Amino acid sequence: MPYRLSAPLKFDFESASTKADPFPLFAALRAAGPIVPVKLPFVGKVWVTTTHAATLAMVKDNAAFVQESRHAGKSGVAGMSWWMPRSLKLLTNNMLLKDEPDHRRLRKLVDQAFQRRHVRDMRANIEGIADTILDEFEGRDEADLASAYARRLPLEVICELLGLPDHDRDIFSAWAKTAMSMRSSFGIFRAFLSMGSVITYVRDQIEACRHEPREGLIAELVRAEEDGDKLNEDELVSMVFLLLFAGFETTTHLIEDSIVALEQNPEQKAYLLADPETRMERAVEELARYSSPVQSTKPRYAARDCVFFGQELRRGDIVMGLLAGANYDPAVFDEPETLKLDRFPNPHVVFSSGIHFCLGMQLARVETQAALGRLYGRFPGLALAAPGDIQWIERFGLRGVKALPVRLNVSQSRKAA
């Protein structure tokens, strides 16, 4: 018989203690059912999937669970309606929030740039950027790996991929820092204030690409034409912001969280560093699963009344998949609370699945592999400066740190090959 929970259940998704040890939260959610109602800031009542099976089924069923509210009898974006500033409405008009066929039309224009083979060809360049950043650490005893490395590396990579002029990258760096401060009402307000100038800058870059050919994805998007269909200017602006943000923040947290996980699990760190060349790829898959830096999907809508994993849902209900819950599900992963860098198979959903799987999945993998390989190749003896006092970001849906101070153990350092 189908069941229906009425009042949202109370769970602590955002506290620092939950981020430090997320396993009890997701175990409690699974115990409540495969799909349960909770209440989230700005969004309100949401149904969340808690198991691997329910999460995978939801993200793959694009007929029953849609991104666009109009396909479920609603208006606006989940949690954001008439009060949204025009700049935010522009930025939310991206392919992550589109259903077919618009999603397919937008995505195919950028898929080529993020294909596995193309991204693998970027590895040497990414490692070079990492080495250049790490050169600045030489002679220092300590460093904040969050701001000086984990955030800087993905930002420089995505700016290069987009083809932004070197002298303008500080503009995006400042905006990205502001965007990552969206953890409170004040942070959101600050981000809104900065959007207008950055949108103007992006429009200027698009116009420059129309008149002066250059390398980079912005220029390719301007030139792109698939089956006679091009991006209009608003779609171009939205796409550039999506690529910047999706290619920056997620990878930043994956690198940060991976360093924390390795330092908290010294035996696994030793295992990886004993043979990083052959073990790194599989290790990053497990670090991604274990850390689950992106803990949930974007909100979707139930397109019709249905019974999903025994739960009655009504048309228009908001549904989100808890990717972290899926990644910690003991029905799929043996000892999910244990970091096992040689875990195989590893069917995690860190990058989601279905048509909305992460566009930058391959880039995030290669960047994290390069970031860890070059960092520990240069500073194998680094250690957390305050292992008992890690400052976690208190924000729903993401797991990352505010800062990551480490001791570099310069006396043990060696130049990366």
Image: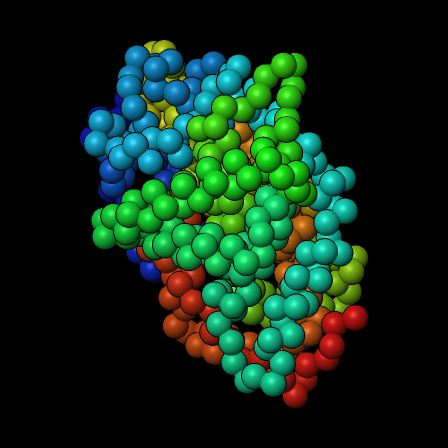
Pinpoint residue 213: horizontal percent, then vertical percent: 66, 38
Image position of 131 (left or right of 46): right
User: Residue at position x 65%, y 14% from top?
Assistant: 227
Identify which residue is drawn at 29% across, 45% down. 192
- 21 vs 377: above or below: above
The percent position of residue 76, horizontal first and vertical second, equals 29, 24
Q: In this view, does 339 lie to the left or right of 233?
A: right
Q: Which of 53 and 147 is in front in this view?
A: 147
Residue 137: image quadrant is: bottom right
State whether residue 143 is above or below residue 129: below
- Looking at the image, which is closer to me, 301 or 17? 301
Q: Dividing the image into 4 quarters, which one contains the N terminus?
A: top left
- The percent position of residue 97, horizontal first and vertical second, equals 43, 27
- In this rendering, the answer to whether 101 lies above or below 357 is above
Q: Quadrant of residue 136?
A: bottom right
Q: Tell which residue pokes out farthest to the bottom in this image.
A: 411
Q: Residue at x 21, y 32 (%)?
A: 83
Quarter of the image with the C terminus is: bottom right
Q: Is residue 60 among what the camera can see?
A: no
Q: Give the quarter of the image for residue 114.
A: top right
